[in-house]
Image (cartoon, rainbow, N blue to C red):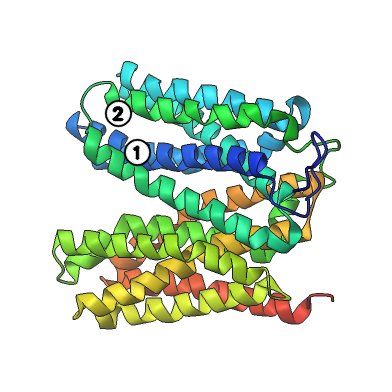
Amino acid sequence: MSKPPSGTSAPVDEIHWPSLAAALASITAVGIAMGLGLPLLSIIMEKRGIAPTLNGLNAAMAGIASMAAAPFTMKFAHRHGVAPTMLLAIVVAAASALGFYYITNFWLWFPLRIVFHGAITVLFILSEFWINATAPPNRRGFVLGIYGTVLSLGFASGPLLFSILGSEGVLPFTVGAGVILLSAIPIFLARNESPVLDEKPKRHFMRYVLLVPTATAAVFIFGAVEYGGLSLFPIFGTRAGFTESQAALLLTVMGIGNFIFQIPLGMLSDHVKDRRTILSALTLIGLVGALFLPMLVESWFLMALVLLFWGGCVSGLYTVGLSHLGSRLQGADLAAANAAFVFSYAVGTVAGPQVIGAAMDVTGNDGFAWAIAAFFGLYVVLSLVRIVLKPKRP
């Protein structure tokens, strides 16, 4: 197996497992921290009598923190190094996770949440950059499929931990902080192999959002549909006549699709000339699936079957979009573009619930499906226009 020189940011011909382990450890911590933290903090605020509006406003700090942290992450990493920045973010995230238990003043949870999710965003961006920078070009989709699968497992493990640990006492906070701290071990061991940022990005941060629009728009749609769908599907499902448990089980099926399709779609992206064609196909399937949702409410089984493949399509936008980004850029440009990628995801997580919720208010329960279809439809138009106007060079 070939081994890259210490500190290189150039991809190698084979998968370098220490670097992969470091990035996977970081993204596992991100997934579990968010999967455990979101329901835990919401339930605690509910028990303390905090109004749902304020509860939701506090939760929205996660997306705002991500958008605020993204532009500065690579500047900090350029100055102090990728691995040291990640290790510092781990310490800050773990300390702020415990802070939610020891700080009982609700209003102090707003800045605390910004600190926590800001640190988590730093880990998110730098783990993506690390794995994208060191992935073998001919196996990038496969490696990023593993990465996306682990992220999905982390998100799924968080609520599972919450169901086991509950919301009482310091234990759930200690476990969350402990998981975050454990991720420092593989990062520390592989610190000499982390990518080196020798130069600053050539463009302003916001230029990178538009530099590879097919990738950043894909992750925006991913954030909007996944976050908005997870937040509001239980309402759509129960209004459509399903019980709460049936609606929750449908979300689980969607999560299974999210998990099992990551690696196959990543591998498929390694064998196509232009990854944008896969992104267009995934959003087209997502569009058709969304339009059919209102017609499937009479059959739980058919709804589950559609959501299984639909979940896979949604998750594929993340994996294939990230792979497309890595195939287009390298070095400092890739680092800045990865930050823009996460920024776009954060914007999607803020916009998705707002747009879908407003659509349900205006047009009724079917507004859930129409809003999601609109998100997918916009991307289909964008991607097809890009493919026609900027065909991939051989």
From the top left corner, tell me how far across and down residue 94 is, in percent. Answer: 46, 24
Q: Secondary structure at mark 2?
A: helix
* Residue at x 67% of width, y 35% of height: 73
Q: Measured along the vertical axis of the image, is residue 270 above or below residue 8?
A: below
Whole-angstrom CA distance, mark 1 to mark 2, is 8 Å
Q: Residue furthest front?
A: 1
Q: What amino acid type is highlighted by mark number 1?
A: Leu
From the top left corner, tell me how far across and down residue 38 is, in percent. Answer: 35, 40
User: Around disc 2, counting alpha carbons within 10 Å, would you say few (fewer than 14), some (14 to 19), or many (20 or more)?
Assistant: many
55 left or right, relative to 388? left
Whether residue 343 can be seen here: yes
Quadrant hosting residue 281: bottom right
In the picture, which quadrant includes the C terminus?
A: bottom right
Per the rendering, the mark at residue 36 is 1
User: Around disc 1, counting alpha carbons within 10 Å, would you say few (fewer than 14), some (14 to 19), or many (20 or more)?
Assistant: many
Q: Do the numbered discs 1 and 2 sit on residues whose CB atoms are within 8 Å? A: yes
From the top left corner, tell me how far across and down residue 366 is, in percent. Answer: 29, 74
Per the rendering, the mark at residue 172 is 2
In-front residue for pair 378/139: 139
In-front residue for pair 196/364: 196
Mark closest to the chain's N terminus, 1 or 2 = 1
Q: What amino acid type is highlighted by mark number 2?
A: Pro
Q: Secondary structure at mark 1?
A: helix
2 left or right, relative to 117? right
